[in-house]
Each structure stands twice: as C-alpha cells, then as structure tokens.
Image (cartoon, grey):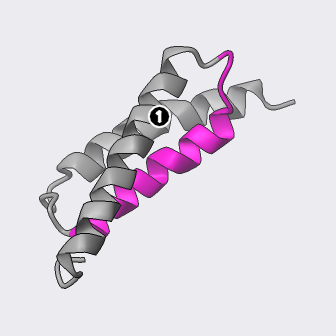
Amino acid sequence: MSGLAPEYMIAARKKYATSSRDVTLALKDTSKSDLDATFKAVMLLATFEIVNGTSKSNGGTWGIYIDGAAPMLKLMIAIRP
C-alpha cells in the first residue's frame, strides 16, 4: 500500500482507526458483541498491517492482533453447540 496516493492512505488509516476502536469496544463486553464479526475484524486489521508493510516481519502489530485472535477463536469453539 506504500504506492497508494496520499489521500487514499489517509482514508485507509481513518477506517483502520475506527475499526480498531470498534474492536476494542466489542471486546470490553463480549456478552453483547458478535464474536464472529469481532474475530473477522481482528483478522482484517492484522491483514491491513501486513499489506501496509509498516509492521516488522517478526510479528510486530500484526502479531499482536493474531495473538489476541487466538483466545477469541478458542472461546468461539467452546461456545458452539
């Protein structure tokens, strides 16, 4: 994404910030949030970090998202009928 026009990068970063904030709010009360949608959002945020290329390959920000997604996935599996 580094070759993107500056106005598109600004728009992408704004959407990223909004999504990150929404995920944080959803995780504060998982009983009221859609865990599937939240998990997918976390995975998309990690993907954004990888595609954007600003995160270090040794598991920078994208690794933090993946580390957070793992317990979410375990919870989703545990509560499935």
The residue positioned farthest toward the bottom in the image shown: 3
**Relative vertical location of residue 42 with respect to residue 5 in this rendering, above or below:** above
Counting from the top left corner in percent of width and height, residue 5 is at: 22, 81
Characterize the magenta stretch by its predominant secondary structure: helix
Q: Does the magenta stretch include residue 5?
A: no
Res 47 → quadrant: bottom left
Q: Is residue 36 magenta?
A: yes
Q: How crowded is mark 1: few (under 14 residues within 10 Å), some or many (20 or more)?
A: many
Counting from the top left corner in percent of width and height, residue 57 is at: 16, 62
The residue positioned farthest toward the front in the image shown: 7
Instruction: Name the residue beneath numbered marker 1.
Output: 23
What is the total number of numbered labels drawn onto the structure image?
1
In the depicted view, which residue is nearer to us: 32 or 73? 32
Q: Which residue is drawn at 28% across and 52% down?
A: 62
- The N terminus is located in which quarter? bottom left
Counting from the top left corner in percent of width and height, residue 42 is at: 46, 45
The residue positioned farthest toward the right in the image shown: 81
**Relative vertical location of residue 56 with respect to residue 4 in this rendering, above or below:** above
**Region in magenta:** 31-52
Please give left or right for residue 81 compared with residue 11 in the image: right
Q: Residue at x 67, y 41 (%)?
A: 36
Q: Which amino acid does label 1 sit on?
A: Val
Q: Residue at x 68, y 32 (%)?
A: 34
**Relative vertical location of residue 24 with respect to residue 39 in this rendering, above or below:** above
Res 20 → quadrant: top left
- The C terminus is located in which quarter? top right
Counting from the top left corner in percent of width and height, residue 61 is at: 22, 47
Please give left or right for residue 76 compared with residue 55 in the image: right
Q: Residue at x 46, y 39 (%)?
A: 69
In the depicted view, which residue is nearer to us: 29 or 58? 29
In the depicted view, which residue is nearer to us: 54 or 59? 54
